[in-house]
Image (cartoon, grey):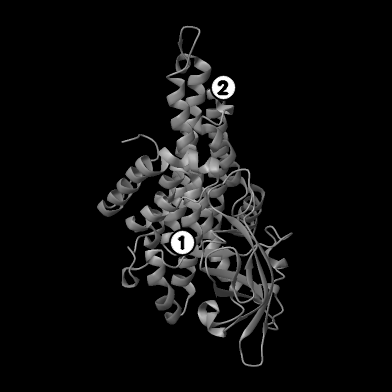
């Protein structure tokens, strides 16, 4: 059992789940990740294996065919998967957020319709807030759903940065609706948009143009989504009531930040493993480089950062499981984990020296993948704004 990234207080079921996932990662993901990533090939066999393990239904209640596990269990599973290949954890993340939104905010009919098929992976979820030029300014959403005379809606607009944009069959889509509210945030609605998997026109008025070419995060497609007069029934509004989309999505984003923190922890963990292993193999000046004080200090700092990031991620996940507000804790965990992951992976890259620049070595892939952690679910600067504003409220002078 590795010394790093241990979590106290886990149940026997949680321990067995993590053991099974770790074995799957070691045997089915790590040996093929390099080849698939360099070819930018979708990891279908890996996804099928995760379906068999029940990962797609990990947090979905047992009454809907899932395992009914906690966010903590999910975050630790994501950490394990990201240790093997970060892209695969992205497939799970967006699916999980949509399932979470349904569990927390969906009507009973929506839960019964989608959750059983999401638990098996038959229905795959994607999460869509961002638009071209939008970034973290959610108030600037311009994709609009216009209410029709018969009570249905027509949606027109362009969405950006959809992980699973092509392979998904259900998209949680944040749009502008005219509810007559004074606040822009109360004029937003989340729709559950059904579509076929694939590129091109995947439903009436719904087009997935093609995948975006990225420096990392390969194997899994990231796409745009174009809607041109897409007709959708009012009962596809998440929760059945318009005007609540922003608040629903922010709940999902909190979970997403824990997920990105977990993915960053997995990358940091793998970066440390590769660095400490190479340091015991490579020799200079008649001894392995791990015996040089400079490298030894670097290894110690890397391990410490891995542990700090892991423990902050675990704390945020446990707090979310209690149902308490945890935007500060989620932001802290995401910020620290992403920054530390980048530092740990870079230190491992330095330990590898010139060989780290070769695509033959795994650390080259991690160097590209870990950069996404700085951006996904909001940059560190965005996290600092969220954290700082909330702290000023809580510590306001009286």
Q: What crowding class fits label 2: few (fewer than 14 Cα within 10 Å), some (14-19), or many (20 or more)?
A: few
Residue that sits furthest to the top in the current view:
286
Residue that sits furthest to the left in the current view:
12
Percent from the top left, x then y, of residue 386? 63, 56
Residues marked 1 and 2 touching at CB (< 8 Å)? no
Q: Is residue 326 in sight in this rendering?
A: no
Question: Could you say whether the residue bearing mark 2 is in a helix, strand or loop?
Answer: helix
Q: Can you identify the residue that label 1 sits on?
A: 96
Please tell me which residue is depicted at 36% across the width and 53% down the height of the picture: 49
Check the image and report above or below for 286 versus 25: above
* Residue 332 appears left or right of 279: right
Percent from the top left, x then y, of residue 373? 57, 46
Which badge, 1 or 2, is on the more N-terminal residue?
A: 1
Question: Could you say whether the residue bearing mark 1 is in a helix, strand or loop?
Answer: helix
Q: Is residue 307 in sight in this rendering?
A: yes
* C-alpha distance separating marks 1 and 2: 38 Å
In the rendered image, the quadrant that contains the C terminus is bottom right
Percent from the top left, x then y, of residue 357? 59, 28
Check the image and report above or below for 312 versus 346: below
* Residue 396 appears left or right of 262: right
Q: Can you identify the residue that label 2 sits on?
A: 353
Q: Nearer the viewer, residue 267 or 291?
A: 267
Quadrant in which residue 192 is drawn: bottom right
Please tell me which residue is depicted at 57% across the width and 25% down the height of the picture: 350
Q: What crowding class fits label 1: few (fewer than 14 Cα within 10 Å), some (14-19), or many (20 or more)?
A: many
In the rendered image, the quadrant that contains the N terminus is top left
Please tell me which residue is depicted at 55% across the width and 58% down the height of the picture: 327
């Amino acid at each position: 059992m590795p010394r790093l990234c241990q979590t106290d207080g886990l149940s026997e079921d949680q321990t067995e789940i993590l053991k099974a996932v770790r074995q799957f990662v070691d045997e089915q993901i790590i040996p093929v990740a390099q080849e698939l990533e360099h070819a930018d090939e979708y990891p279908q066999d890996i996804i099928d294996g995760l379906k068999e393990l029940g990962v797609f239904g990990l947090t979905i209640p047992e009454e809907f065919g899932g395992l009914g596990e906690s966010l903590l269990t999910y975050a630790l599973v994501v950490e394990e998967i990201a240790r093997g290949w970060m892209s695969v954890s992205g497939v799970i993340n967006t699916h999980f957020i949509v399932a979470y939104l349904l569990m927390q905010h969906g009507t009973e009919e929506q839960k019964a319709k989608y959750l059983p098929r999401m638990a098996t992976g038959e229905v795959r979820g994607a999460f869509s807030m961002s638009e071209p030029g939008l970034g973290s300014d959610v108030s600037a959403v311009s994709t609009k759903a216009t209410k029709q005379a018969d009570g249905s809606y027509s949606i027109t607009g362009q969405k950006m940065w959809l992980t699973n944009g092509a392979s998904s069959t259900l998209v949680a889509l944040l749009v502008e609706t005219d509810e007559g509210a004074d606040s822009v945030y109360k004029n937003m609605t989340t729709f559950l948009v059904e579509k076929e998997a694939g590129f091109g026109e995947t439903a009436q008025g719904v087009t997935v143009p093609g995948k975006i070419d990225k420096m990392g995060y390969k194997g899994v497609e990231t796409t745009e989504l174009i809607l041109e007069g897409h007709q959708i029934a009012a009962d596809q509004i998440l929760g059945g009531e318009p005007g609540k989309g922003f608040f629903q999505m922010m709940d999902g984003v909190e979970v997403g930040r824990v997920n990105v923190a977990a993915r960053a922890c997995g990358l940091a963990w793998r970066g440390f493993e590769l660095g400490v292993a190479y340091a015991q193999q490579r020799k200079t000046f008649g001894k392995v480089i791990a015996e040089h004080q400079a490298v030894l200090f670097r290894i110690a700092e890397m391990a410490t950062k891995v542990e700090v990031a892991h423990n902050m991620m675990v704390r945020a996940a446990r707090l979310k499981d209690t149902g308490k507000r945890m935007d500060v804790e989620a932001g802290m965990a995401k910020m620290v984990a992403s920054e530390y992951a980048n530092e740990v992976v870079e230190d491992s890259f330095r330990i590898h020296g010139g060989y780290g620049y070769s695509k033959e070595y795994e650390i080259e892939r991690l160097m590209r993948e870990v950069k996404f952690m700085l951006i996904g679910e909001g940059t560190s600067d965005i996290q600092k704004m969220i954290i700082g504003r909330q702290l000023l409220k809580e510590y306001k002078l009286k």
